[in-house]
Amino acid sequence: MGFLCRFRKEPVALMGDIEGMFHQVGVAEQDRDLLRFLWWKDGDLTKKPTKFRVTVHLFGTTSSPACTNYALKMSANDNEKDLGADAANFICRDFYVNDRLTSVESVHDTVTLIRNTQEICRRGGFKLHKFTSSNKEIIEAIPI
């Protein structure tokens, strides 16, 4: 929870979200039987059920937060050299599950951080969006 203490350390506050984070990370083929469920068509319990296996992580599954955060942090580590330590550190230190929360020294630094972090996330199969900030210039600088 150190990110909460760091949140207002600098003058420019920034918050964002990763869209459908759990659904962006696949479940390994050999583990899908652990997330198997039965479905009765039209709710008719007299019929034989159909078996399904979940292929992505679900909200509410005990393992999902750890698995998806691991995937996100691996994306940060894999792309740190290309996109910078600031963006990688931001992903590794200032996320709480799928929400990001930080403060940055300047508008320019914040816009750079957003762009680099979005690219790291994109490369990892995540979409970083829903930004809000204490500074209107930052919101206007973010592509829709």
Image: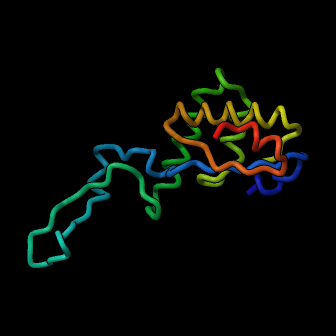
Q: Position of residue 121 (x, y in %)?
A: 58, 37
Left/right placement of residue 107 relative to residue 115 reads right
Its colouring scheme is rainbow
| Image height of 143 relative to 47, above or below | above
| Image height of 124 relative to 37, above or below | above
Q: Point out the residue furthest to the left here.
A: 47
Which image quadrant for residue 50? Answer: bottom left
Left/right placement of residue 115 relative to residue 35 reads right
How many numbered badges does the structure rendering display? 0
Q: Residue at x 86, y 53 (%)?
A: 8
75 vs 103, nearest the viewer? 103
| Image height of 51 relative to 7, above or below | below
Which image quadrant for residue 70? Answer: top right
Q: Residue at x 59, y 39 (%)?
A: 73
Q: Position of residue 87 (x, y in %)?
A: 70, 34
Q: Position of residue 120 (x, y in %)?
A: 60, 32
Q: Position of residue 125 (x, y in %)?
A: 49, 37
Q: Residue at x 73, y 57 (%)?
A: 1
Q: Point out the residue furthest to the top here.
A: 82
Location of the C terminus by quadrant is top right
Q: Residue at x 44, y 45 (%)?
A: 25
